[in-house]
Amino acid sequence: MKSYMESVTKTLVSNEKIKELVKKHFGNSVSLVSAEIIPEGFFNACYRLELKDCEHDKLILKTGVETGKYVLTYEQGLMQTEIDVNKLMEKNGIPVPRIFATDFSRTDIDCDYFFMEYLRGVPWGSIHNTDSITSDNTRTLHRELGRYTAMIHSIKGDYFGYIREDKFYRHQTWREAFRAMVDSLIQDGRRDKIELPYNEIYDTLESLWHLLDEIKEPSLVHYDMWAKNIMLMEKDGRYVIDGIIDLERSFYGDPVADFISTTTILGDFENDKDFITGYEEIKPFVFTQNDKIRLCMYGIYMGLLIGIEVYRYKDEDIDNILNMSRGIISHSLNKLRSF
């Protein structure tokens, strides 16, 4: 599959324009030494900037989607969500990059954008040489991950659903919110003629929606906390979590939904003593049979997201992405049938 740099939602900006934006927000004396696009990421474009005569020698510029470009229903307003959640997490002591300047006026370029801190670490998922992380260091990282995950889940909202000002996304119960999330996504998928097993999904979920009523309190859920979105920095010969990034898909809902990504890092997270120890430094770790069922429901939603987002990518990549989507959905459906 080719680089996700070719996603149609990414707004690419010339060096000359970046120079203008830098001077506007950081002063005319600041010079742009270099601007390099970061290839990772699926939705927004990110540039790694090197600056001269600035308080910050390196920054990240993140650009949103241009006016009028097609996005899915839930993707509207994602950049504002990222900024709002970033502030929430920073306020609650969770390591996130600092945001230095934002602009939603669309007067300089035809998209929202912001400048944020350049984290000196590397994505957890990019450390391919496992020998560079000792088994003891791995255990401390798992504890850190547990603690920060619980800290995120300790942030509470006033409603369930995606974090937007628009009341369309806000609901009084988690059942209403998650069903609306599924309905909206499937409506987009059907409109775009994406072939996924929608009827089978609805048939399977019909007898399970009531389990969502067990969630009485809206908790912050990152829902995108894969290894690529957790930055590690080496300190005194050991890696520590330096920052958690890509917050735009966050919502208020069932904290169990975050364990979708936790599984990809830890495997059997519910029996990972270090993760649980870290989690329980902040709040009790509970994972019941009904939690396991709901986790499969959130797995179906993740599979839907991956498949219905294919509108962004080049034709030659679509089959691979849809196969991945169908595999995740099929796996989750089969697990639900096993309960």
Image (tube, rainbow, N blue to C red):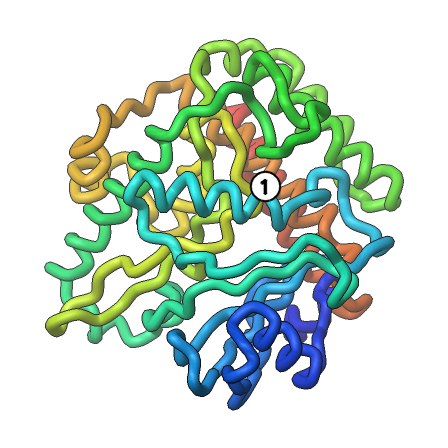
Residue at screen point 21% across, 74% down: 132
Counting from the top left corner in percent of width and height, residue 301 is at 61, 35
Can you see residue 184? yes
Can residue 201 be spotted in the picture?
no
Q: Position of residue 31 (x, y in %)?
A: 53, 86
The residue located at (55%, 35%) in the rendering is 332
Please provide percent x and percent y for residue 80: 61, 45
Give 68 or 53, whichever is nearer the viewer: 53
Say whether residue 331 is left or right of residue 325: left
Residue at numbered disc 1: 302
- Height in image: 264 above or below 228? above
Looking at the picture, does residue 116 appear above or below residue 292?
A: below
257 with respect to 276 (left or right): right
Q: Is residue 326 above or below residue 253?
A: below
User: Which quarter of the figure has residue 181?
Assistant: top right
At horizontal 41% and vertical 57% (from top left) the residue drawn is 98
- Residue at the limit of the structure toward the front, as seen here: 28
**Foreground residue, 319 or 169?**
169
The spot of residue 269 in percent (x, y) is 30, 41
**Residue in the foreground of this view, choosing between 241 and 318:** 241
Q: Bin the neighbour count of mark 1 within 10 Å (Cα to Cα): few under 14, some 14-19, many 20 and up.
A: many
Q: Amino acid at mark 1?
A: Met
| Total number of numbered discs in the rendering | 1
Residue visible at 41% across and 70% down? 118
Dot 1: element: helix
